[in-house]
Image (spheres, rainbow, N blue to C red):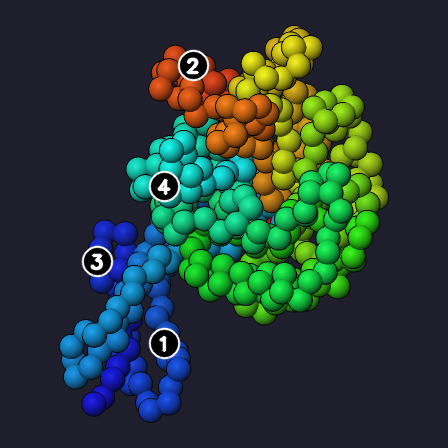
Amino acid sequence: MPLTVRSILYDASKKTIGMVESAVKNGDTSVNAVLTIQNPRLWNSRQDPYLYKIVTQLREQGKVVDEVEQPLGLRYYRVSSDSGLFLNGRYLDLYGFGLHEDVAGKGSAMSRGDFKKDIDLVLETGANALRFTHYPHSGEMYRLADSSGIILWSEIPLVGPGGYTGTGYMASASLQHQARQLMIEMIRQNYNHPSVFFWGLFNELKLDYDNPIPFLEELNALAKNEDPSRLTTCASFLDNDQFNHVSDLIAWNKYYGWYGGKFSDIGPWADKLHHQFPRKPIAISEYGAGAALPNMPIHYWHLFLPESFTLKNGRPLFMKHIGKRWQKGLISGVSTSGCWLILDLLYAQKGSAMALMIRDWLPTTGSLKKMLFLLQSQLEFFTNDTYYSKEI
């Protein structure tokens, strides 16, 4: 019986603007089809997250036997080491949060309402980027990011064992096989989401046991083969150049003033880093402080209020020490303001959640509004007349 594949293109108003149908020959595993959009409307992050839609049908004797619907957002972008990220030819600052799938009483078994609530909080802060830590998230979150204009960093769960004090990377054939499989599945499942800009290779691997770099180079090549159109990145906490060549971009998790040192140390650190690696686009993927105030040392309270991140004089710490370097392009690309996290994890009740907000606080409208207002005031440092400011 003759089989055909029909692809139907719709605009955002659900008007059909194109259709193509191709015959499926015996032994075919794929069908190529070309559709042209005259004067397309571009997907432009939060300013205009315009989406087309493609419906692809498998038809037998004219009857639909299977179909799949996929988003279509048209955009182009690049990241420069000296001037940052450009979306559709115009400069765009990225600022946002890390996000885990986690709700009290549910863990990661979240409903669509839970996902929508998290995205709404992100949007209310004024942020435009999320890092899906440390694993691919639900398809619903990618769809919500598409429709709301949130730019995504999506990564696989290749995470350094034991954190700062653990053994480090341990080479394992089964681990490497799993990482390859996860990378392939993440990219193939989420390839059509215009919100995804970056594929993440790892988080906080170390160099004091087995050397992870040969495998990371292989993993990066795999990602580029699966999707040559997107950039790869990683999140490191080591102040050296060992990981600089394994991905297109590199970001650092830096907790100056919390795990050690002073928050003001982050400025000189960033200057030194850019001077050492002037051709590498760099970013800050994590920064922050504990959100569980009753469980943090009292001498931190005056310095790190989790919802405001303020100095004694009230000027935001991040803006004071990073903002000027960001605007000059010395720190550019990726999720440059990657606050860890927007919402706490379930272990917050036991101690030291590294988060901007505790979920248990959210029903208190006044407290939530205060936190959002403070965060918005920080983001205004970047968005006031500079959201789109430079053209190619």
Tell me if I can see residue 386 in this picture. Answer: no
Instruction: Name the element at disc 2.
Output: helix
Foreground of the two, 114 or 28 = 114
Q: Residue at x 52, y 30 (%)?
A: 347
Whole-number angstrom distance, CA of label 1 to CA of label 2: 53 Å
**Number of marks in the image?**
4
Instruction: Name the element at disc 3.
Output: loop
* Disc nearest the viewer among 4 and 1: 4
Whole-number angstrom distance, CA of label 1 to CA of label 3: 20 Å
Residue bearing mark 1 = 33
Residue 256 in the image, given as x and y percentages of width and height:
73, 27
Nearer the N terminus, badge 1 or badge 2?
Answer: 1
* Disc nearest the viewer among 3 and 2: 2
Nearer the N terminus, badge 1 or badge 3?
Answer: 3
Specify the amino acid type for callout 2: Ser
Residue bearing mark 3 = 15
Residue bearing mark 2 = 367
Whole-number angstrom distance, CA of label 3 to CA of label 2: 44 Å
